[in-house]
């Protein structure tokens, strides 16, 4: 193992958690990285989620209402992403190792396993989206070939993560910005329908859907910002870089959705039918690999919290092969329920983390060692936030929704239209963490 470590470039990620993380990423490196993650094919294929679709999949919000809900949700999610990014830069620790300080070493395994599961799901989903978009470009090649090619590209990028981040800044970001401007000009020249047709009911459901996409990066943010030169730069790059481009991409996706009368299965058509559309859309398809790269890399780093001496290169190859196989045999289509589940788990966890790190025991320094003591009080605060989220919006999975509806009835609680499951669960979890933390200190 020692000989392998010596061969690692000084400006690249260590192979295990036993070596310190190099501080080599400046503001623009990070800003470009988060900006590229904000521009996703999901912003097009999943744009309908911010329209608060009902159980039949029909949009509830108008396009205008959906744009406003998305912008609000994305801005709030960007701020939360910034809060998750700063501790990594301050401590030099990856996300799941940070949770040793929040929950204790052994209890950190619970969110770590959940994070690994959601990242494998996202990684699989990204390969499926890439393959679908590639087939929309050219359907003369079998879907399986596109999935395998995307899986190989993802694995190669993940073997040199910091090199890939710098590659995005130097070349990919400019190409993506040019493609976005081009498609805006082209789609706005098309005869758009009435964008106000619909309602504003379910506004916070749409906002929470957009926020959940941002939140999906919260439990991995520190994996990258531990290499940042400053905590302030890490916060700003994550909050601004991601939010700005996600808003731009989602608005474009909603315009495309309006042009195909809300049919999400045809949302790529407006991009491909304009002049040079195939060329510029190919930029988005190739760039999507940075999403799957980030998911696979963070999965490997999360596994290292469980097995600190595991070599991330071996983990990368195994995980890259694993999500490729899953993408070949699965079809992830229930985006809305997946997003609400992610939000209900990780939004309150961030509330607990932010409260304790910035206002509680984190000010004195967290113990992130392998024998860090368990902090059951922080787990309790997390669960309080999770329950709050479910009481307000339990999602649309039948049996799960029915269970929480029964709980609502038993508590004589009726969710109101102004209630945001994300915001309230974040605040409740954070307040609970502060109260429990102070009580523990007094004892």
Image (cartoon, rainbow, N blue to C red):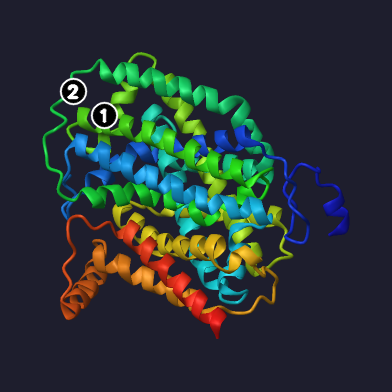
Q: CA distance from mark 1 to mark 2?
A: 8 Å
Q: Residue at x 23, y 18 (%)?
A: 190
| Residue plotted at (73% across, 51% down) | 21
Q: Is residue 150 visible?
A: no
Q: Image check: 40 left or right of 189? A: right
Q: Of the numbered discs in the image, which one, if any, rests on residue 307?
A: none
107 on left or right of 93: left
Look at the picture and state if 305 lies above or below 245: below
Label 1 neighbour load within 10 Å: few <14, some 14-19, many 20+: many
The image's mark for residue 192 is: 2
| Badge 1 element | helix
The residue carrying mark 1 is 255
CA neighbours of label 2 inside 10 A, class few (<14), some (14 to 19), many (20+) = some
Residue 241 visible in the snapshot? yes
Q: Position of residue 294 (x, y in %)?
A: 56, 46
**Horizontal arrangement in the rendering, residue 399 relative to residue 247 (left or right):** left
């Amino acid at each position: 193992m020692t000989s392998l470590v010596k061969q690692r470039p000084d400006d690249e990620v260590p192979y295990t958690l036993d070596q310190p993380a190099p501080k080599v990423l400046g503001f623009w490196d990070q800003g470009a990285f988060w900006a590229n993650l904000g521009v996703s094919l999901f912003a097009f294929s999943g744009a309908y989620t911010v329209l608060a679709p009902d159980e039949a999949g029909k949009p509830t919000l108008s396009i205008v209402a959906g744009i406003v809900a998305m912008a609000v949700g994305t801005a709030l999610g960007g701020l939360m992403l910034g809060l998750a990014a700063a501790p990594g830069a301050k401590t030099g620790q990856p996300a799941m190792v940070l949770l040793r300080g929040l929950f204790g070493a052994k209890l950190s395994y619970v969110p770590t396993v959940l994070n690994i599961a959601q990242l494998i799901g996202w990684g699989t989903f990204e390969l499926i989206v890439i393959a679908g978009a590639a087939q929309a470009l050219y359907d003369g090649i079998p879907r399986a070939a596109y999935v395998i090619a995307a899986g190989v590209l993802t694995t190669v990028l993940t073997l040199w993560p910091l090199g890939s981040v710098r590659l995005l800044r130097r070349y990919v970001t400019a190409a993506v910005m040019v493609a976005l401007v081009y498609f805006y000009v082209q789609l706005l020249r098309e005869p758009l329908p009435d964008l106000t047709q619909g309602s504003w009911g379910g506004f916070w459901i749409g906002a929470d859907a957009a926020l959940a996409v941002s939140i999906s990066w919260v439990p991995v943010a520190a994996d990258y910002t531990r290499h940042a030169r400053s905590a302030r730069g890490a916060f700003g790059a994550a909050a601004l870089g991601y939010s700005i481009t996600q808003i731009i991409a989602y608005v474009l996706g909603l315009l495309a959705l309006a042009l195909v009368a809300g049919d999400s299965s045809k949302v790529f058509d407006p991009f491909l039918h304009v002049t040079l559309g195939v060329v510029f859309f190919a930029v988005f398809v190739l760039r999507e690999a940075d999403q799957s790269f980030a998911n696979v890399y963070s999965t490997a780093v999360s596994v290292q919290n469980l097995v600190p001496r595991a070599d991330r290169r071996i983990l990368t190859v195994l995980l890259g092969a694993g999500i490729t196989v899953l993408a070949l045999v699965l079809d992830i289509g229930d985006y809305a329920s997946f997003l609400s589940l992610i939000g209900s788990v990780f939004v309150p966890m961030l509330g607990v983390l932010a409260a304790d790190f910035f206002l509680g025991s984190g000010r004195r320094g967290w113990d992130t060692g392998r024998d860090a003591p368990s902090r059951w009080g922080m787990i309790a605060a997390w669960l309080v936030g999770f329950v709050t989220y479910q009481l307000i919006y339990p999602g649309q999975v039948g049996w799960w929704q029915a269970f929480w509806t029964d709980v609502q009835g038993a508590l004589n609680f009726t969710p109101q239209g102004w209630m945001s499951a994300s915001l309230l669960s974040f605040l409740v979890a954070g307040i609970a963490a502060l109260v429990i933390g102070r009580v523990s200190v007094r004892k």
